[in-house]
Image: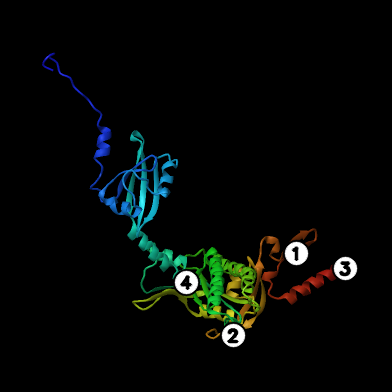
Amino acid sequence: VPEFDFIIIYAEDITAKKVINKFPDKNPNPVMRIGTNGELHYFNDASNYIIQIWGIGLNEAIPQEIIKNLTKPNSNDTRNMEFEVGDKTYYYNLVKIDEFDFFLLYGTDITDTKDKERILGKLSKYFSPQVYSSIFTGELDVNINTNRKSLTVFFSDIKGFTTITEKLEPEILTELITYYLTEMTNIAIEYGGTVDKYIGDAIMIFFGDPKTEGIKKDAVSCVAMALKMRRKLKAIKKRWESFGLTEALDVRMGIHTDVCTVGNFGSQDRLDYTVLGNGVNLASRLETLANPNEILISENTYNVIRNDIRCTYIDEIKVKGKSHPIKTFQVQDLILDKSDRETIDFESDGFSLMMDKEQIKNKEKIIGYLKKSLNHLKH
């Protein structure tokens, strides 16, 4: 100031102006500035599609579903959202700028990712969860590859289902069989079974691949699954009765434990993850021989589960491909504790008795000893 021979310096804090005015117009992703009441103050070029679909202009309110997130408490002052806008899907990151009392809304177009997820979701319907997971984690290669493993194989079908189908309209039949298969499949997944295939009303499931808990646990899980399926039939039957069906809902089940070949079979263009071998054939044969609502297992399976599942010996059967007859057992129920294992272990002065009914091979000989012991006590 010449008149007074000194200089005046004016200072201004332009930080806010830099933040507001240097808005990222060149950002390839949508960025918007939102007021605390949900009004749109500014947006970059990449946001044009969103703004057009929303049908709003500057200083107008953004959609209510986003405004709701403005007041949500968050320790990091950051809220993450996912919304569909038109035919696109965006992942939004809402950041509170406390110094200037507004929000920045950052968007990322994830349409391609969501489309791939939807496709994978549809593909997952064609695989057992264990197989699907193993394929997409890289544990299973998508090529022809098989292994020999000890598996427990399960088969079931509905007795007289063909007769039932002749009485139903296609829509009702589809609804009923879908409900039945869904309930059975949910139980199989609960117990860790790999659902191999549906053959009409029949179901094939195996335990021991691609995940295994060991031969014994796999077999016990398979039989426990079958027991729960049988209990579930009561609820399913009520659903069927509501459609006017008077026929009994009877299911036959067969289980066998054996070494089988499991893996990807097929051609270079189409693969099927399944299990093959005599063990599969025997499980299927047991299912056809089972009585209605009976769980019939082989001696192989019985020997593995005998301490955990109560079973009754049924008979011997001859099976094609086997040189000797196969003993079969009917599954009764789970053995819940040691006292249920049909064992006796008692000792007193001059007397000792230990008996495990499951281990006895010659019952008549044991009965003879017991009678002789009783005669000694009486006299």
Instruction: Return the x and y of residue 23 as percentages of the image width and height.
Output: 26, 42
Q: How is the image coloured?
A: rainbow
Q: Taking 189 as reference, is 13 left or right?
A: left
Q: Are marks 1 and 4 in contact (CB under 8 Å)?
A: no
Q: Point out the image quarter for the N terminus.
A: top left
Q: Secondary structure at mark 2?
A: loop
Q: Which residue is mark 2?
A: 318
Instruction: Work out whether mark 3 precedes mark 2 in sequence or the reverse, and give the earlier one.
Output: 2
Q: Taking 207 as reference, is 6 left or right?
A: left
Q: CA distance from mark 4 to mark 2?
A: 24 Å
Foreground mark, 1 or 4, reads: 4
| Nearer-the-camera pick, 231 or 89 | 89
Q: CA distance from mark 3 to mark 1?
A: 17 Å
What residue type is disc 2 on? Lys
Q: Which residue is mark 3?
A: 378
Instruction: Return the x and y of residue 57 as percentages of the image width and height.
Output: 31, 47
Instruction: Work out whether mark 2 precedes mark 1 in sequence or the reverse, and give the earlier one.
Output: 2
Q: CA distance from mark 1 to mark 4?
A: 41 Å
What residue type is disc 4 on? Lys
> Which quadrant of the view contains residue 180?
bottom right
